[in-house]
Image (spheres, coloured by chain):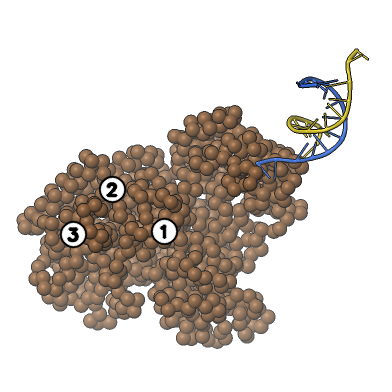
Chain colours: A brown, B blue, C yellow
DNA sequence: ACCGCCGGGTGCC
DNA sequence: ACCGCCGGGTGCC
């Protein structure tokens, strides 16, 4: 039952090809310290001078930031010293600056400062500097300092700061002994995820468990966890508490992490992270919750809305706080901003619209504007006059910076990021765009706040405008590094931070001793399929050909350069496991393996690149951009045949100019060489849906049909999902479904919003004659997609990423499911599919044993990935 | 004395 | 800065 590997993000695909440790992947901006491998080289005492020229003040033991100032007219080596607030305190003394400049500019080390004493000096003050970097740069840093007559002192003894000392992480660990200087053991991704959930296990009965009662008449209609959420959200928006890690001390407000103090009271976050992992529970309610504050309704309207009891209750609780019990507050405040902005992935946009339109819009006269599509209004006042503005992350990112985006000119009453983990990458355009929105009440809705590592949290924390973490350096120094290095107290800090701003309930959470959600069982069966002699022959010949090509790449050491091609080989094999028609032109299918720009006309090159891109996009490889690690938005392909989001790769080129290099292979990049994907039709490599092609079945289709017919005989009312990554395969399956008289519907990524909604409603209907089968493309829809009518799932082909499969299964195994869910995975014997399963299982095992395992080194990981490629094609 | 020494002026980068 | 450093004033004991 319990899945514990869902943190495998879609970046897994790249990992599976061993690309993530290739130089510069994940280091695109070059500005971020590689926390995973940074070690402390040593410390150095220096002085800050020129104090009297600047206003920035510091306290003893306060952290300071060292910032290069290459354009300083007096000294190109100048290094500024800023306090936590960003105010300049002074400069590093010039001799020292001369030594630091080179180190900082070449990013050999990150230099951090603390003022140990003398903070109130008038002219100069001491600064204790720490040098952090990768082991391989240590010598260069030491040399550089030596050249200028400086010598690093060994790291100050960390004293009580033993690693793994935190109760949270070690739990059962005994006392810890002397700690090595190196970051020996780091938290693995798996540990982080499970540790994240542990944060909430021993949560005391505090404010989060206090429920808010609605009016007497309806209070009982709310489920306990709904009341709890309601109370928490209201208190978050109205609380006057100090943000975490701030204390009031006489006339100052003191940050206990950085020792920064200021007179101005730091504002608390009017919002937080709703990290409920309960599928529908929140989906059902969040639309409601977020429009409530702005509604202008008379209470009596609501009596009809049993279904929206949480809304009812919420409104009543607002009424109680206003002067008149009879009239509901008209506006949140008369002169303040009016509109709530909701940003969500495209896949759940229809969900929100649907809910608003069906249940709220018509009855409550709420102005809702869907800011999407090319005809979206550029007029900020149009947006600011709405009650709700809905948009997507892609629109947010596209708009940002391109023109004077109205989204960024409106001051919002409230900003809600749905599936907020979408902004986990700080360098992604959508993250920057989201961080630049204006509005005080800020909410993040996400089931997975941590997808890969603590790193993922920064964007969310920064979005919430939690001082001082909006600046990455302070987040990094006070939370991220202590946590990843296992410094005592680090995890405890993260814990109190997260707890103070997050409400999390999982499927297994309990409220008042009762499970918040009880789901029927979920079973996964593997159904092996044997290819016919004929199918096997084709498969074998393609395999041998691909194998030969890939072994050539291995021997030439060009595995990475040919990653699209390797994917292509694997893709074709996976397609052949499903149906021969998915993979057309098998004999000449490798003609594209040798792309060289030389002997091709520009037209040919263009076509080759477009074909390659289509191949990548259709390979089921999660269509992910190596820059932002997100699904590709506006995919473009480089001349070296790597695919990125257009905004992402433009940003890379802009920041690395004039000699930008491909983040994946370090080949030169030029804007004019980028080729965009003609996105007019659904991308499917197999372009095999040729209507004139005669329909034939395949072993896998036979296996499916056998199972479907048996199911229909045994339980005629059971509905099922037939899932594939290949939409062409789904089209092929339509034939036998028709032949055997199945009523079916279909949902895939290429369908228009309206069609999708129709398909879903039709399938979910319990009417006689409604479809019993839905053909579903693996990644259609998002977490919000609700297909609880189905109790059976047939997964036609395995995905790279087990998490993608799980997300798909969760579309029917969620609140509202009345039956046990049975999932059947069709796997072809002795094929790439079986090998994929083995790799998936290994990942699961690894994840399950998370606590004991040590994070493998980069080279180990790389070797693993190379082995995976070999294993996939039996090399 | 093309020095030493004195004491005033002065002060980030 | 209760410092260092600079440069002008000065000059045996």
Q: CA distance from mark 3 to mark 2?
A: 23 Å
Asked which secondary structure carries label 2, the reply is: loop
Which callout, 3 or 2, points to the residue nearer the camera? Answer: 2
Relative height, residue A250 to residue C2 (above, below): below
Nearest to viewer (mark 1 / mark 3): 1
Left/right of residue A583 with respect to residue A390 in the rendered view? left
Give percent across and percent down for residue A574. Answer: 19, 56
Please say if the residues under marks 1 and 3 sit with CB atoms less than 8 Å apart. no
Q: Residue at x 44, y 52 (%)?
A: A657
| Front residue (pair A524, A13) | A13
Q: Residues within 10 Å of mark 1 (few under 14, many from 20)?
A: some
Q: Is residue A306 above or below residue A436?
A: below
Is A589 displayed left or right of A72 in the figure? left
Q: Pointer 3 indicates a residue of which chain? A: A
Measured in 3D between alpha carbons, the distance from the residue under mark 1 to the one under mark 3, in whole angstroms, is: 33 Å
How far across and down, in percent of the image, does residue A716 sit? 20, 74
Chain at numbered mark 2: A
Residue at 44% over, 67% down: A398
Q: Is residue A732 visible?
A: yes
Q: What residue is pinned by disc 2?
A: A561
- x%, y% of residue A418? 46, 66
Q: Which residue is mark 1?
A: A650
Q: Earlier in the sequence, mark 1 or mark 3?
A: 3
- Give the quarter of the image for residue A10: bottom left
Find disc 3 in the rendering and name its residue: A575
**Closer to us: A131 or A861:** A131
| First along the sequence among labels 2 and 1 | 2
Query: Between A23 and A79, which is closer to the camera in this rendering?
Result: A79
Label 1: chain? A
């Amino acid at each position: 039952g319990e899945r514990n590997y869902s943190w495998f993000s879609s970046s897994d695909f790249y990992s599976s090809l061993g690309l993530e440790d290739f130089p510069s992947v994940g280091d695109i901006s070059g500005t971020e310290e590689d926390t995973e491998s940074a070690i402390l080289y040593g410390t150095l005492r220096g002085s800050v001078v020129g104090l009297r020229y600047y206003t920035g003040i510091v306290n003893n033991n306060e952290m300071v930031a060292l910032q290069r100032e290459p354009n300083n007219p007096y000294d190109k080596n100048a290094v500024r010293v800023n306090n936590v607030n960003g105010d300049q305190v002074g400069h590093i003394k010039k001799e020292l600056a001369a030594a630091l400049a080179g180190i900082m500019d070449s990013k050999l080390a990150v230099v951090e400062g603390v003022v140990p004493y003398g903070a109130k000096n008038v002219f100069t003050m001491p600064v204790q500097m720490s040098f952090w970097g990768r082991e391989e740069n240590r010598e260069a840093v030491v040399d550089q300092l030596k050249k200028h007559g400086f010598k690093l002192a060994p790291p100050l003894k960390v004293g009580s700061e033993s690693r793994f000392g935190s109760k949270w992480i070690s739990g059962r660990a005994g006392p810890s002994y002397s700690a090595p200087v190196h970051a020996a053991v780091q938290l693995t991704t798996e540990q982080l995820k499970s540790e994240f959930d542990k944060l909430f296990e021993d949560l005391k009965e505090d404010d989060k468990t206090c429920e808010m009662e609605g009016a007497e008449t309806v209070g009982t209609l709310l489920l306990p966890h709904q009341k709890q959420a309601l109370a928490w959200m209201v208190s978050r928006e109205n609380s006057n508490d100090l943000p975490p890690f701030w204390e009031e001390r006489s006339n100052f407000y003191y940050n206990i992490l950085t020792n920064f103090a200021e007179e101005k009271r730091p504002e608390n976050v009017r919002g937080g992270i709703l990290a409920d992992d309960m599928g529908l529970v929140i989906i059902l309610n969040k639309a409601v919750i977020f429009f409530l504050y702005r509604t202008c309704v008379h209470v009596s309207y609501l009596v009809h809305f049993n279904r929206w009891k949480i809304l009812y209750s919420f409104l009543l609780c607002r009424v109680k706080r206003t002067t008149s019990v009879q009239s509901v507050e008209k506006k949140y405040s008369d002169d303040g901003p009016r509109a709530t902005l909701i940003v969500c992935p495209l896949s759940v946009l229809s969900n929100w619209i649907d809910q608003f339109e069906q249940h709220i819009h018509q009855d409550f006269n709420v102005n809702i504007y869907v800011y999407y599509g090319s005809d979206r209004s550029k007029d900020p006042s149009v947006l600011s006059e709405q009650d709700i503005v809905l948009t997507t992350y892609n629109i947010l990112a596209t708009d940002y910076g391109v023109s004077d985006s109205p989204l960024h000119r409106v001051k919002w009453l409230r900003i809600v990021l749905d599936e907020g983990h979408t902004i986990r990458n700080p360098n992604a355009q959508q993250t920057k765009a989201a961080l630049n929105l204006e509005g005080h009440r800020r909410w993040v809705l996400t089931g997975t706040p941590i997808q890969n590592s603590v790193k993922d949290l920064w964007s969310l924390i920064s979005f919430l405008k939690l001082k001082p973490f909006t600046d990455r350096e302070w987040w990094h120094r006070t939370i991220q590094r202590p946590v990843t290095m296992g410094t005592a107290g680090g995890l405890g800090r993260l814990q109190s931070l997260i707890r103070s701003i997050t409400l999390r309930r999982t499927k297994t959470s309990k409220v008042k001793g009762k499970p918040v959600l009880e789901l029927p069982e979920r079973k996964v069966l593997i159904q092996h399929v044997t290819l016919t002699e004929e199918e096997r022959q084709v498969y074998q010949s393609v395999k041998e050909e691909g194998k030969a090509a890939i072994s050539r790449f291995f021997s030439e050491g060009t595995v990475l350069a040919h990653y699209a091609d390797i994917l292509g080989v694997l893709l074709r094999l996976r397609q052949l496991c499903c149906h021969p028609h998915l993979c057309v032109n098998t004999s000449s299918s490798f003609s594209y393996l040798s792309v060289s720009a030389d002997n091709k006309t520009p037209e040919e090159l263009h076509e080759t690149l477009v074909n390659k891109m289509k191949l990548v996009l259709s390979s089921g490889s999660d269509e992910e951009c190596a820059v932002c690690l997100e699904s590709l938005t506006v995919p473009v392909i480089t001349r070296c045949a790597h695919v990125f989001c257009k905004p992402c790769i433009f940003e890379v080129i802009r920041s690395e100019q004039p000699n930008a290099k491909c983040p994946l292979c370090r080949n030169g990049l030029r804007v004019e060489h980028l080729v965009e994907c003609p996105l007019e039709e659904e991308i499917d490599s197999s372009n095999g849906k040729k209507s004139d092609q005669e329909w034939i079945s395949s072993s896998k289709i036979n296996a499916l049909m056998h199972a479907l017919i048996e199911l229909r005989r045994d339980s005629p009312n059971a509905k099922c999902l037939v899932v594939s990554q290949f939409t062409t395969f789904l089209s092929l399956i339509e034939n036998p479904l028709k032949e055997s008289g199945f009523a079916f519907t279909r949902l895939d990524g290429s369908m228009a919003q309206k069609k999708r909604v129709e398909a879903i409603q039709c399938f979910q209907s319990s009417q006689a004659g409604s479809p019993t089968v839905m053909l579903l493309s693996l990644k259609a829809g998002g977490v919000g997609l609700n297909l609880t009518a189905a109790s059976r799932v047939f997964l036609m082909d395995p995905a790279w990423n087990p998490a993608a499969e799980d997300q798909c299964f969760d579309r029917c195994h969620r609140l509202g499911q009345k039956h046990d869910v049975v999932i059947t995975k069709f796997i072809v014997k002795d094929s790439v599919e079986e090998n994929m399963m083995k790799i998936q299982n290994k990942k699961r095992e690894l994840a399950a044993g998370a606590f004991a395992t040590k994070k493998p080194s980069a080279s180990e990981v790389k070797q693993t990935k190379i082995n995976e490629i070999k294993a996939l094609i039996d090399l």
